[in-house]
Amino acid sequence: MTTTTYTVKGMTCEHCAGSVRTGISGIAGVSGVDVDLATGTVTVTSAAPPAGSDVAAAVREAGYEVVSRP
């Protein structure tokens, strides 16, 4: 298992976190998504690191923006 942390812009509440969590959870191989509203970070747990473009697309579809990724 690997973990990858992204910084996401625009999340302000639990509804925001839920939208991002749901979107990223739909990516193949993702087994967990932890959203920290205080820091604006999203940590993704998966069998192999997901493609950054897949994560960015899922976040964008939820209405937010990845501003930093590995």
Image: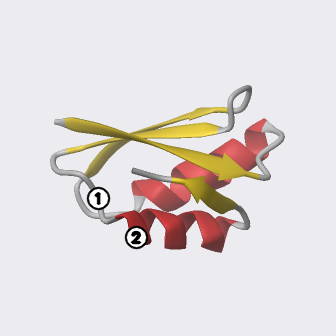
21 up-or-down from 60: above or below: above
The image quadrant that residue 29 belongs to is: bottom left
Name the foreground residue: 15 vs 43. 43
3D distance between C-alphas at marks 2 and 1: 7 Å
Spot occupied by residue 2 in the image (x, y as percentages of width and height) = 22, 37
Q: Amino acid at mark 1?
A: Pro
Q: Position of residue 43 (x, y in %)?
A: 45, 37
Q: Position of residue 63 (x, y in %)?
A: 73, 67
**Tag shown at residue 50:** 1
Q: Residue at x 59, y 37 (%)?
A: 41
The vertical placement of 53 against 26, above or below, is: below
Q: How many marks?
A: 2
Circle 1 Cα neighbour tier, 10 Å, few/some/many (<14 / 14–19 / ≥20): some
Residue 7's disc number? none
Label 2 crowd (10 A; few <14 / some 14-19 / many >=20): some
Quadrant showing the N terminus:
top left
Query: Whole-percent x and y of residue 5?
Result: 44, 40
Residue at point 26%, 63% (across, down): 28
At 79% from the left and 52% from the top, the residue drawn is 10
State the residue position of label 2. Answer: 54
| Three-letter code for the amino acid on which mark 2 is drawn | Asp
Secondary structure at numbered mark 1: loop
How is the protein colored in the picture?
secondary structure
Task: Tell whether 19 sits left or right of 58.
Answer: right
Residue furthest out toward the top: 38
Is 4 on the left-hand or right-hand side of 21? left
Where is 60 relative to 4, above or below?
below
Q: Are marks 2 and 1 in contact (CB under 8 Å)?
A: yes
Element under disc 2: helix
Query: In the image, 50: left or right of 56?
Result: left
